[in-house]
Image (cartoon, coloured by chain):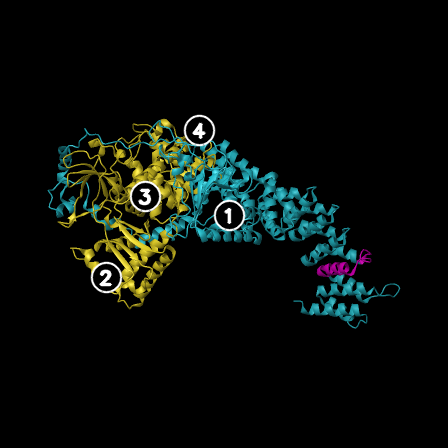
Chain colours: A cyan, B yellow
Amino acid sequence: LAPGSEFPRINLSGGEPEKGPSPAPAEPALDLKIDLIPPDQSFDSLPPKPDHHKPLHTSIPDRIPGELDSSDVGNFFTSLDKAVRARRLYQANNPVYQSFVATLRDALGRLWEVTNSLSVSVEEHGFRWEGDLFTVGEGRDNLSFLFYKDGIRYLTFLPTFEEEIENFLDVMHKSRALDQSSDDDMVTILWEKEFTAFQYSYVDALAEGLYLPDAVPVRQDQRVEPEQVQAELAGEAEELDTNLTPTAVQQGKPSVAASITREDFEETLYFLEPAELDLLREEVEKEWRRDLKADVLAAMFDRLEDPIPARQTEILRILRQLLPAYLGRGDLASASTVLIELNTILETSNILEEEQAQQARDLFAELSEPAALTQLLRSLEEGAIDPSGAELSIFLRHLGSQSLPLLLRHTETTRVIALQGRLRTAVQELARAYPDRLIELIKSDDEIIATGATTLAGQMALPSAAPAVATLLTRSSIPLRQAAVNALILIKSGAALEALQNALEDGDRDVRITAARGLTTLRYQPARNRLQAIIDGNRLRDADLTEKIAFFEAFGAVANADSVAMLDRMLNGKNLLRQKQTPELRACAAMALGRVGSPASRAALEKASTEQHPMVRNAVLKALRQEMSAP
Amino acid sequence: MTKGGLVQSDTILQPLGRALVTAFYAAAQALKLYPLENATTQKSLEELFNIVRKLLDREGAVDLKLVGDFLFLNDARLRLDLSDYLAFSHVAGMLNKHGIGEIEFGAALTKEDLAPLISLMLQDAPIAEPFVRFRDRLALSHAGNLRIEPSKGAEPEPELESEEAAKQAAKRTYFQSVQVAREVLTDTRLGKAVNLRRVKRAVQGIVDQVLNNETSIVGMTTLRDYDEYTFTHCVNVCIFSVVIGQKLGLTKLQLYELGLGALFHDIGKQRIDQNVVNKTTGLTDDEWYQMQQHPTEGLLSLFSMKGLTEMPYRAMLQAYEHHMKRDLTGYPKNKRPRNPTLFSRIVATADGFDAATSKRSYQNQPWPPDEVLREMRDNPQRGYDPLLVKAFINVTGVFPVGTLCILDTGEMGLVAARNPDPTKVHQPMIRLVSTALGVMIGEKITVDLAEIDPATGKPLRAILKTTDPDRYGIKVADYFV
């Protein structure tokens, strides 16, 4: 269009022009300017509005024309309406949805029996064919409006569209979700789908207000002076010889200068060899496999190292935005890369000014805050993200100590067993970096956190944690005391085992048994007197057999000659009333003697080998076997 | 694809057509090397027959036509790509040799009909009346169900009207894209949200044009406007990148992604002092340092671009890496390992070519396009990917569109298009500008430099020299609008 000329207005009356005015209510002319249409033509003549009796861009022979009627078209749109609605309600593999798709296919099949294409104009409230308006959906929710609002004005459906129906319905479904802020509209989505049996024409929104320059006619007074041309050619005559073009030589033309070389005519120089083609194809494939995010991050960190504080601040701001995005997608590997790189830069002096260094440190701190961490843990719990244990460990390792309480609490309370294992390993990595904080948390009033910290300290066999753990034995919570006993056993330091003895007199049976078994395993000699006092006293009188066994075995494990004598008395001796101990205690004494492995203990057991009471006899025989098999 | 606003699709016909030409070529190669009864020959004939049969079932008729240097299947022009252009040129060459313009495969075609046809095509053609001779010999063979027509020779190019329409469509796409580039860059400078839908439509339009109307849209890149350089350059780089991508066999969606990044490749310049960007004299060290920041600024711009709902990592890398050379010199400097992406290297090639051939702020005298290509190809210091430069030359020809040439006839002409025959990269289509006597030519006369003088058997015209249009007061853009 010439500058300043009027743009044509679009006549949206719809319908075939030759059929006269449309029965649809008159619509205002759309205030869209397009350059597609020359000023002397109406929109209806352009773009080509397909005649539904003739095939469009297909060589399929024409069928008998004129048999398509409104009921066929109506049937098609009704089926389309139902299928579109079904797609909104059901997943694509749902049988109900599939049945609607099948119905739509049938409707199309009936259309193709009488025509080779169906073309309709798109109006705000429906699709128009031969003067009839077909509405698909209601109000602003109607299908035609989806097309109409993005400028699409004509649709043509062709045979084999039935093979593309589901793809088409997916587009309709997706386009409903688009809003003003979307990157896409109906035109851009349809373009990506590359339909073969569905065509559309649209008002080109990009053409609005566009100025297109016209060709400038050649000036009649202008000339190219042949002398100037000759001079230019002759001016380079000295360069001629080897650069002469083959064509000129072949044709016996006079020698003239040339800026082009013989090489320019060696077409083989420009061909891509098969190996080069293969290389390029390989490059294309590689391009789609490569980790672009890693490349971008590497670029960001390269530039973060440039001494430009304003840019460093901007990059840190971008990283701060990227991290939640990565975490939200479960991309802990990328998030870890960011943290590792940032950490390295922070540890290298002189890269960041103090202000930027503080911004970087703030980023770590923010990530470790409960608000941020809770979201990550919730995603893990819900299975929304599922990083590997290694990824989780690497990421958590870079968080601050303030993240420990929350992580410990979640590790203890998660109902996902597999996650608990991964979290324990991961949190352990973090705790290694902050042992003092872990010890503080052992003393936490929050029972769950204290339990988690204690368990972790045990797993880490952290000797410095023993005093803190020991204090837990006075706490009222049984699980906490139990965790403390377990931790002390694993820590194994002198202080830990010293504290462990206190648990032998814990108020809870299970705690006592655990402590006794721990001492059995560790053969902690200093515990002998305490154990002897318990065994020799009345403490075990009311205990069940399991507890008795645990204590006697612990005693046997640390027994000396005096201990053997005491056990011998319990097994074989009588009290002042000439009565023997109860069979349970005698059996337990036998088991303890079986753990000693000295001649005296063996003699004591052999003395009782003829014992009549089955419980005692069994225990003795078992102890003897145990002693014989001992190294 | 879109054509005049109407979206059509030939996504089934195109692959089948390309398969037909490739199978034709394979059968010809087999018949050249082995006897008819050889299993390889039979297999290749079988494959060719199956494709023809498939087309017959789908289309009802199969009509392979050679018009100029284009192959048409049932009136649809077959598009070349990297994987099949040799087959195309071979088949076109065989048809040309015998003066065949059209082969129609009949509905009752059998496999046995194909062998005589191809065998005859492989034979040498007489200088006089090659078509008549071929037709007679085909008639004597047992091949039936085939109809051949002679080539139209020097008849005027068909569909001039549609050619004009194609040019108009290309022009519209080009100027729309320039407008969108202007909006995007301006909005970015002002910190406004970018309307990505418009950007998408523009890039999709360019991809459509490259796929369907490559010559016209590439011709539009000569419309370099000094005042609008920033915007036209973005669009030109987008077009050249998509053209190279097409040559590499990228899919439509991949071409879109490539084009999008290419359109944004210089977005970082919007964050550089515009006095420096538009400075017409030489840059000081400090100003040059500022200019060198634009790839980094481009990367950061795309991170911060308002209106994006997804991180365009590929585009970010295109913006960041497009001034890196193969040996990683150039700028910005890398501290961590880096291997620029294929897309970045494509954009670097397209950017280098367009920048060197344009008149812009600190380059009053643009380089002639053919010299730019030669420099890019031959000077490793420039740091371009040699394979991509080669692929680019395959697309542009040795003499890119818009190059002003002095012909050995004394005429002057502008390169209007590369020769569609890839073996004739040095013999482009020339739009004549002036006669040997220096008279300017008003009407549009396009000549093919590969056209042979029947009297001598040699080309009618040849390029003697490329030259600077400014020297003769010729405005290249006037011939492409």
The residue lying toward the viewer, choosing from A66 and B50, is: A66
Decide if residue B146 is on the left or right side of residue A73: left
The residue under the point 55% across, 53% down is A99
In front: label 2 or label 3: 2
Secondary structure beneath label 2 = helix
Residue of label 4: B190
- Residue B279: which quarter of the image? top left
The numbered mark, 4 or 3, whose residue comes first in the sequence reads 4
Residue receiving disc 3: B214
| Residue A151 picture quarter | top left
Q: Are marks 2 and 1 on the same chain?
A: no
Residue to which mark 1 is pinned:
A71
**Is B45 covered by the magenta stretch?**
no
Dot 4 or dot 2: first in sequence order is 2
Q: Pointer 4 and pointer 2: residues touching (CB < 8 Å)?
A: no
Chain bearing mark 3: B
Mark 4 or 2: in front is 2
Instruction: Mark 1 and mark 3 in contact? Answer it, CB < 8 Å.
Output: no
Amino acid type of the residue tagged 1 in the rendering: Ser
Q: Residues within 10 Å of mark 1 (few under 14, many from 20)?
A: few
Of badges 1 and 3, the one in the foreground is 1
Element at badge 1? helix
On screen, residue A279 versus residue B463, left or right, reads: right
Q: Which residues are magenta?
A: A536-559
Q: Considering only vertical position in the picture, is A448 above or below B42?
A: above
